Image (spheres, rainbow, N blue to C red):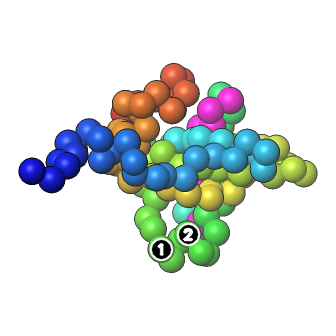
Amino acid sequence: MPNMETEDQQEDFTRVRMPNVKEGEMFGIADQLLGASKIRVMCEDGVSRMGRIPGKIKKRMWIREGDLVIVAIWDFQPDKCDIRFRYTRTQSMNLSKRGKIPADLDIF
């Protein structure tokens, strides 16, 4: 009989992008859509920031309220950030089960 892997073992090997702290990236939750490629994001450090959705992401994926995202804070304006990546609902739940999301953002 061939080596059969269970579904739980396969989930452990799925690779998802994690925030790169060296580049100033962190987790955030999309709070409010403001229009004109702007979004209000609650970041993991407890600060609510104005997020900008770059054209590269705007054309590929839709961001809705309540989505888990990776944001990069601007160096010259710390109250603003760029959206770098959006997790799907399944990826968010998987990260939550593994304890990778900070407790204050964990709504999944």
Q: Which residue in the rendered view is the most extreme toward the right?
A: 76
Which residue bears the numbered disc 1? 60
Whether residue 58 appears in this view of the structure is yes
**Residue at x 51%, y 32% (from the top left corner):** 101
Real-space CA distance between mark 2 and mark 1, rounded to the nearest whole angstrom? 5 Å
SS assignment for the magenta stretch, majority: strand
In the displayed structure, 15 sits above or below 42; it is below
Q: Nearer the viewer, residue 45 or 21?
A: 21
From the viewer's perspective, is 43 left or right of 99?
Answer: right
Classed neighbour count for the residue bearing mark 1: other residues with Cα under 10 Å, few (<14), some (14–19), many (≥20): few
**Residue at x 73%, y 42% (from the top left corner):** 21
Cβ–Cβ under 8 Å for marks 2 and 1: yes
The image quadrant where one finds the C terminus is: top left
Say what amino acid the circle numbered 1 marks.
Answer: Arg
Span highlighted in magenta in the image: 36-45
**Residue at x 40%, y 51% (from the top left corner):** 14
In the displayed structure, 35 sits above or below 103; it is below
Q: Nearer the viewer, residue 22 or 63?
A: 22
The verdict on residue 44 being magenta is yes
Q: Which residue in the rendered view is the most extreme toward the left?
A: 1
Which residue bears the numbered disc 2? 57
Percent coordinates x, y for residue 51 in the rendering = 65, 53
Classed neighbour count for the residue bearing mark 2: other residues with Cα under 10 Å, few (<14), some (14–19), many (≥20): some
Say what amino acid the circle numbered 2 marks.
Answer: Ile
Q: Which label is found at residue 15?
A: none
Percent coordinates x, y for residue 82 in the rendering = 69, 57
Percent coordinates x, y for residue 20 in the rendering = 69, 47
